[in-house]
Image (cartoon, helix red, strand yellow):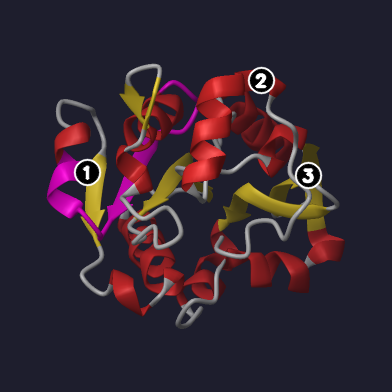
Amino acid sequence: MTRVASVILAAGGSSRMGSPKQLLRIDGITLVRRAAETALASRCQRVYVVVGAAAEAVRRELSELSLEVIENPDWEEGLAGSIRAGIEAVHAGRPEFDAAILATVDQPWIDAALLDRLIEVFAGGEQEIVACTYAETVGAPALFARRHFTDLTRLTSDQGAKSLLLAREAEIARVPFPEGAIDLDTPEDYQHFVERGRCFILKKKRIQDKF
């Protein structure tokens, strides 16, 4: 059986939003809890949530869920530290995991079926990276086989996993996810999404530089 862990990156300071986006609510559920419940409903065997900014409030949102919260005290230094903290926790897991899915909290159309599709493509193919495609790019959520864990932990500062995806494009299996272009970065993004839901127009912008 293919063993895959989920790493949810929920440590950022949400500078463009002006308040912790992890705690924004859609249909009464915060984004971080929504992401965690989605991962728990998928075929991922274990879920890790990396927290930093507003850590205590985020922890409260995850209470009673069967997952592991990993705190990144250096979250202000950049995204790489959160990826490193999450991947190191996965690497230490027993029994060993074959792969990890990195996901963010601000893509509201991620669902368990999508995460399961990433796992299915990985388990049934030869590629060791499986990434979503949208807006003419590759991005989150993305699955990385165990042999890429070391590369992920070597990322520095605000260098995210996107840099690794771009460096290994020829090795990536792709899963279409056009709704991945919708991410909630600003108050306007959030307001438009809440008001318009699935009618929200896919944004044409630089996508997931923060992943």
Asked whether disc 1 touches disc 3, contact meaning CB atoms under 8 Å apart, the reply is no
CA gap, disc 1 to disc 2? 26 Å
Q: Which type of secondary structure does the marked residue at label 2 adopt?
A: helix
Q: Which type of secondary structure does the marked residue at label 1 adopt?
A: helix
Q: Is residue 95 visible?
A: no
Q: Label 2: how many residues lie within 10 Å, few (<14), some (14-19) or many (20+)? A: few
What residue is disc 3 on? 134
Q: Tell me where residue 81 sits by quadrant.
A: bottom left
**Could you tell me how many numbered marks the image carries?**
3
Instruction: Give the position of the C terminus as an image quadrant.
Output: bottom right
- Tell me the residue at 56%/41% (across/down): 189
CA gap, disc 3 to disc 2? 16 Å
Magenta stretch? Answer: 41-59
What residue is disc 2 on? 198
Q: Label 3: how many residues lie within 10 Å, few (<14), some (14-19) or many (20+)? A: many
CA gap, disc 1 to disc 3? 28 Å
**Is 69 located above or below residue 207 in the figure?**
above
Judge left or right: residue 131 versus residue 19.
Answer: right
Of labels 3 and 2, earlier in sequence is: 3
Asked whether disc 3 touches disc 2, contact meaning CB atoms under 8 Å apart, the reply is no
Of labels 1 and 3, earlier in sequence is: 1
Of labels 1 and 2, earlier in sequence is: 1
What residue is disc 1 on? 58
**Three-letter residue code for mark 1:** Val
